[in-house]
Image (tube, rainbow, N blue to C red):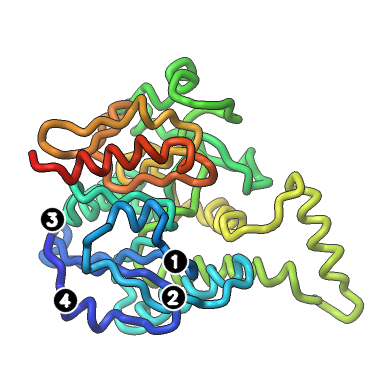
């Protein structure tokens, strides 16, 4: 994969609070398919995993640093506007949205990322929006509707449905079996489909804070929401969850941890291995790591190990 500076220059969107990389790769499905990677983040990325893993990469740009953060509506609105701008000129543009606590492994090139994406789409029966998947979730009130590990993954990777192996892998107790819970820290798909999804999620979020009719008490509605969700305030992930469960015909999660490794609840020091060829592998799922997400406190628990692994990736091989 190569970086196309002309595309990168034209892709700048000022004032959005978005960090963007633009690559051009080639896959069997497209002789020259592009991938844009963006992270919605209004804060400085100085001490984040995303900055740590892309340190020294001049292709990685911060756009709109310093936007005023007014809760998750800011994050969702920024993402939607970004996707809307891309959709206006290239609705099929492949886009990857990541949080700032995501590691991008330099040993996995853009060709590999795009290829892994298309492999998941094909195996899922054509579902073109892909989220990361983790062992637990706090952001859905519809657990009975969550799909379980599909047979094509279970047959290829039986360890993903082996409860004893999963217990050994986990660093704390989790709710159910397998990497089945959507996490919105990594999302990949065509710009137009992601735009429609992010718009729907944003509308759902804003509806909590708006009076639907005269006399409507939105504050009471919000309080009821928080009480229903174990005193957790609404996040963008909850509304992406709703979209996923309402559109399982076009949205899936990375059940096999092929493209996205979501490392919450996982003892990363037991499964990560930097091999002699300089590539980072997840030995539990036997996949080369492209993107690893460390949501919540997991990034602090394993910060030193992650940094050592990234340093090993940067060393000559």
Q: Which disc, if any, is residue 5?
A: 4
- The crowding category of the residue bearing disc 2, from other C-alpha atoms within 10 Å (few below 14, some 14 to 19, many at least 20), is some
Name the foreground residue: 106 vs 188. 106
* Rendered residue at 26%/52% (across/down): 118
The disc, 4 or 2, on the residue closer to the chain's N-terminal end is 4
Q: Is 305 placed left or right of 235 in the picture?
A: left
What residue sits right under mark 1 in the picture? Answer: 44
- The crowding category of the residue bearing disc 4, from other C-alpha atoms within 10 Å (few below 14, some 14 to 19, many at least 20), is few
The disc, 2 or 1, on the residue closer to the chain's N-terminal end is 1
* Rendered residue at 55%/26% (across/down): 172
Which label sits in the foreground, 3 or 2? Answer: 2
Quadrant where the image shows the C terminus: top left
Asked which secondary structure carries label 3, the reply is loop
Q: Is 19 placed left or right of 31 in the picture?
A: right
Q: Do the residues labelled 3 and 4 touch (CB within 8 Å)?
A: no
The disc, 3 or 2, on the residue closer to the chain's N-terminal end is 3
What residue sits right under mark 2 in the picture? Answer: 65
Which label sits in the foreground, 1 or 3? Answer: 1
Which label sits in the foreground, 4 or 2? Answer: 2
Q: Position of residue 163 (x, y in %)?
A: 49, 19
Mark 1–mark 4 Cα distance, whole angstroms, equals: 24 Å
Mark 2–mark 1 Cα distance, whole angstroms, equals: 7 Å
The disc, 1 or 3, on the residue closer to the chain's N-terminal end is 3
Mark 3–mark 4 Cα distance, whole angstroms, equals: 24 Å
Q: In this view, does 167 lie above or below 90?
A: above
Q: Is residue 179 above or below residue 2?
A: above
């Amino acid at each position: 994969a190569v970086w196309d500076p002309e595309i990168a220059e034209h892709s700048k969107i000022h004032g959005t609070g978005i960090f963007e990389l633009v690559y051009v790769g080639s896959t069997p499905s497209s002789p020259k398919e592009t991938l844009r990677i963006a992270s919605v983040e209004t804060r400085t990325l100085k001490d984040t995993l995303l900055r740590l893993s892309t340190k020294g990469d001049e292709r990685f740009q911060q756009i709109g640093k310093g936007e005023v953060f007014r809760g998750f509506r800011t994050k969702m609105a920024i993402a939607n506007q970004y996707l809307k701008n891309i959709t206006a000129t290239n609705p099929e543009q492949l886009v990857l949205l990541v949080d700032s606590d995501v590691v991008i492994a330099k040993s996995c090139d853009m060709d590999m990322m795009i290829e892994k994406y298309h492999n998941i789409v094909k195996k899922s029966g054509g579902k073109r929006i892909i989220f990361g998947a983790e062992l637990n979730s706090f952001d859905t009130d519809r657990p009975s509707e969550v799909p379980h590990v599909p047979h094509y993954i279970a047959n290829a990777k039986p360890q993903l449905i082996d409860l004893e192996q999963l217990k050994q892998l986990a660093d704390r107790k989790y709710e159910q079996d397998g990497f089945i819970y959507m996490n919105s820290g990594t999302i990949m798909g065509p710009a137009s489909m992601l735009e429609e999804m992010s718009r729907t999620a944003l509308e759902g979020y804003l509806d909590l804070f708006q009076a639907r009719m005269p006399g409507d008490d939105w504050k009471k509605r919000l309080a009821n929401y928080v009480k229903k969700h174990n005193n957790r305030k609404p996040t963008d992930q909850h509304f992406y969850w709703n979209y996923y469960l309402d559109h399982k015909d076009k949205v899936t999660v990375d059940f096999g941890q092929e493209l996205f490794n979501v490392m919450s609840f996982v003892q990363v020091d037991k499964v990560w291995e930097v091999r002699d060829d300089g590539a980072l592998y997840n030995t539990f799922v036997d996949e080369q790591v492209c993107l690893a997400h460390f949501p919540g406190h997991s990034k602090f628990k394993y910060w030193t190990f992650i940094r050592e692994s990234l340093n090993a990736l940067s060393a000559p091989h």
